[in-house]
Amino acid sequence: MGYGLVGCEIKKSRRENGMFSLPLRLLLCCLFLILICLVVAPLASDRLPINTPEIVMPVLEPEIVDPIHTVVTTAIPAASTITQQKDSIIDQYLKNENFNGTVLIGSQGNIILKKAYGMANYNKEIVNQIDTKFLVGSITKSFTAMLVMQLEEKGSLNLDDPISKFLPEYPNGNKITIHHLLTHTSGLPYYYSYNYDTPILKVINRIGEIPLLFEPGNRFSYSSPGYLILAYIIEKITGKPYEDVLDENIFQVAGMDNSGYFHRKTPDIKIAIGKNNYGTTMDLGGSIQLTHGSGSLYSTIEDMYLWDRALYTDILVSSETLKKIFKPYVSVNSYDFYGYGWLISDNGKLVSHSGHISGGGIGIISRFIEEDTVIILLSNIEAEDPEMVDRISRKIKLLLS
């Protein structure tokens, strides 16, 4: 009501006095606009400072990615991006090394890479696959050592037992202990060749005729015949063939369904046929049993991964027994030690074992304990450099970093 009265008075005054001429109206409008600016400007300044710089969105240029030399620039890249980049880098590295076989990398209980390269059988043009079986050579020794430690845990033998307890007629058998055989400190020779059909006990007796290289326990000297003797002792204590004890107490327990003891007539087309340095195809029927208990097994990368996982648990032996297995007992060189069937490196941070089949075949399992990372390489090609798989394994570990 008040507003209406004011309006009436304005109209009346304008009619009576003629105060609101055109120039005056313009002046009043300008004053009104200035008043609005003085009121609104401070309110706007509370929301956006007058000197606030303009935010300009950059124009992104398309990136050309080199799969071998990719540099990650984001602070926290997606996990899938990391996997793809490292997959590409490792894949190219293995191709550059002409790697022929299978590879598996596991980290903290997950398989982060597994691949197959090259040929499993050159004559039949069969390519390697993830489930291809390979002869693992001296990686067998880790399994033989586990069987011995299972018997020790059960009280069936003592590590300080002389082998004369099981081989009464063996020369120097009272000097050589189970511990000496496990740690390659027995003084026995590096290798001994014999015919495929020769009974194992007869082979052991012939090895006993060879003079010891040194007094047992004095130093490290790698000896495959020592593990052949351990396999015989396992058979004598259990009353079963070595391969049956292995299958019942390790393979079945760990779920390693694609691993076993290789026989000359093993009917399995998926066992990779290797080549040596001269391109000659390996004769699977020739000399494999010459390494009974020390190099007689076959496996796959996935089964070897199950083996790795089992060694973090007590399904095979107790944690205390595992500590004995991975204890560095004897110096191999200035930076490596040997436990029971395992090479101990980097102050116990790395435990590994490689295998080499003369005539075609190499492999390695490298377990980086602190990081719970495992790298497994199995190949059916004999390398000119016996340490090739160890070198490749360590390089892959660096590429993962």
Image: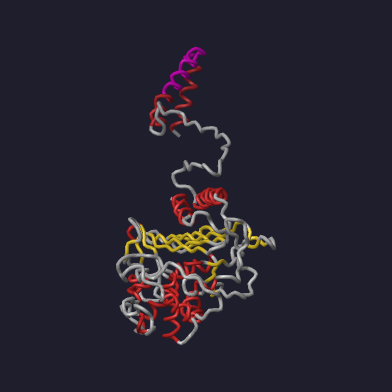
The residue closer to the viewer here, 33 or 337, is: 337
The residue under the point 56% across, 78% down is 197
The quadrant holding residue 313 is bottom left
Q: Is residue 342 magenta?
A: no
The quadrant holding residue 343 is bottom left
The residue closer to the viewer here, 27 or 132, is: 132
Can residue 17 be seen here? no
Query: Residue 45, how many percent across, how many down?
Result: 39, 30
Can residue 9 be seen here? yes
Query: Residue 216, how many percent across, how many down?
Result: 32, 71
Query: Residue 337, how many percent across, how many down?
Result: 34, 62
8 in relation to 282, above or below: above
The residue under the point 52% across, 66% down is 136
159 in relation to 401, above or below: below
**Considering the image in quadrants, where does the N terminus appear?**
top left
From the viewer's perspective, tell me whether residue 375 is left or right of residue 65: left
Q: How many marks?
A: 0
**SS majority, magenta:** helix
Query: Residue 266, how many percent across, how many down?
Result: 61, 75
Residue farthest along the bottom direction in this orientation:
239
The residue under the point 43% across, 67% down is 190
The residue closer to the viewer here, 324 or 230, is: 230
Name the colouring of the figure: secondary structure
What segment carries the magenta color? 16-35
52 in relation to 178, above or below: above
The residue closer to the viewer here, 177 or 11, is: 177
